[in-house]
Amino acid sequence: MTEAKSVVTACALIIGNEVLSGRTKDANLNWMATRLTDMGIRLMEARVVPDIEDVIVAALNEVRAKYDYVFTTGGIGPTHDDITSACIAKAFGVKVERNAEAVALLASYIPADRLNEARLKMADIPAGGELIHNPVSKAPGFRVGNVYVMAGIPSIMRAMFDGFAPLLTGGAKVLSKSVASFLPEGSVAEGLSEIQDRYPGADIGSYPFNRDGKFGCTLVTRTSDENDLAAAAGEIWELIISLGGEPIDEDLVSIEAGEKDGYATGDDK
Amino acid sequence: MTEAKSVVTACALIIGNEVLSGRTKDANLNWMATRLTDMGIRLMEARVVPDIEDVIVAALNEVRAKYDYVFTTGGIGPTHDDITSACIAKAFGVKVERNAEAVALLASYIPADRLNEARLKMADIPAGGELIHNPVSKAPGFRVGNVYVMAGIPSIMRAMFDGFAPLLTGGAKVLSKSVASFLPEGSVAEGLSEIQDRYPGADIGSYPFNRDGKFGCTLVTRTSDENDLAAAAGEIWELIISLGGEPIDEDLVSIEAGEKDGYATGDDK
């Protein structure tokens, strides 16, 4: 057996005109990103593409060669605009086949008089594909090679992901430590850059916020080395004190929903 | 003068490790998508990339050649992890220069004793770049060629976008008409596909939902041809009636927040 990879990478491919037109707000990327990070899989790219065959095929072939895993969402329903299955087949140079196991799953859920051709289309899977279980509404996703094809509906996507997640192989888990203060970014920037230089194996990021009208920033250290994590975060803690700020261990305090859900407003950037 | 283009395209390039690690939930894509659609600019792709110079430069050069406009968010602050300006310069093969106008803007907002080198970095702009006004906190974005570089913080991004939006040239506006019913997708799929075939210039999409436990789907027609829009939406309306459903004009009724914000759960997909 070869040694496990220490860095395992992934790409999310979000398929759907409705996300690009603004009709639908994607709710899958952040969930997937969080889950993958927890599993030691590094999401290196996310791409939203329209329901255009050539575009989906080209994007898929590019990213499946580049990353260890590709996770797609959207376009596997019964309507004419659901073309993901055909696109995956084309990208892999295989045919779409009506999968008997998938037909049986649909038949177990949909009454025979409603199991029409459109619904049966949800059993059309690229040849060689392995079904991904859908505990919510039976119509399966599938895996071909390193590409995992899931529904766009969040509850179904999550259930599908949770089903196959134990079979994914993560690498070294990236650990993180978040230290916040009410010092503005421009004040900590110089010292922070020096700390980053001392820990080239860590990624140190600065994320500004405005909480109840008070400006500040959260300084996040990310690395798979526990010792570096503790040392760099410790230096950040001391930096804040040396600049007259009060460090806050953000991994310990509970943050109001919304404050972490996107950037806050009005900082000094 | 050449004739105005009827199809004007765009790409959103979202720059930041924090979106890919799951720490931050992007709040810019959906806002931008909606705004561009309203302006007759078609968002054809969105890409989230990490804070890695080579990756940003390669992605930028690819998408700026492919689309009429590129809009980037993130990475223009004062800290070491803010590398967007340097990346844009590299992609265009120009140097980063300290922009006198940008320095003056920062000096008008930041007290002299706090205008340190880190904050002045926010005035470093690719040579030939034009400043994008930031009414929230002064530190400007910039435009180079067809690339518009904005902050990642939503309030600032929106203010920057609104400032330059009147200068963007849109193409034929894509109009849309949404007709919903409590028929499941699998029931409307066949008839809907026939309507799509009759209106090849229109994009007809089906988006399932679950409202108060009742399943259904919204059928959205999108086209820049008013007559096709009315005719196709009219046929969808009749299709729903013919299948025993009750069509709902979703452009007229107010939808609860959240129902349109992402997919609903539990449909027959």
Image (cartoon, coloured by chain):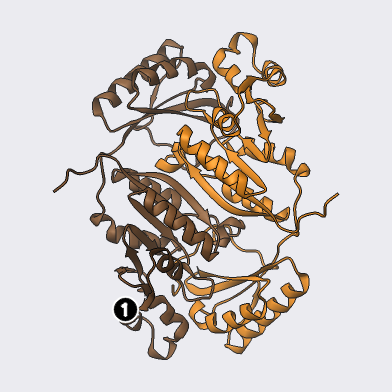
Chain colours: A brown, B orange
Question: What x and y, as percent, mark residue A29?
Answer: 45, 51
- Quarter of the image for residue A174 reads top left
Mark 1 — residue?
A105
Give the residue at x 32% y 57%: A146
Residue B159 placement, left or right of A250: right
Question: What x and y, as percent, mark residue B96?
Answer: 60, 23
Residue A153 placement, left or right of A249: right
Report the number of numbered marks: 1
Give the residue at x 44% y 57%: A60
Q: Is residue B13 above or below residue A126?
A: above
Q: Is any atom of residue A256 visible in this view?
A: no
Of residues A144 and B210, the one nearer the viewer is A144
Q: Secondary structure at mark 1?
A: helix
Q: Is residue B19 above or below residue A139?
A: above
Q: Quadrant of the C terminus of chain A?
A: top right
Of residues B54 and A99, the one nearer the viewer is B54
Q: Residues within 10 Å of mark 1 (few under 14, many from 20)?
A: some
Q: Is any atom of residue B193 visible in this view?
A: yes
Give the residue at x 33% y 72%: A127
Query: Can you name the residue that lies furthest to the right here?
Result: B1
Chain for disc number 1? A
Question: What x and y, as percent, mark residue B187?
Answer: 51, 83
- Quarter of the image for residue B17 reads top left
- Quarter of the image for residue A247 reads top left
Q: Is residue A96 above or below residue B135?
A: below
Query: Can you name the residue that lies furthest to the left here?
Result: A1
Question: What x and y, as percent, mark residue A86?
Answer: 45, 71
Query: Can you name the residue that lies furthest to the bottom here?
Result: A113
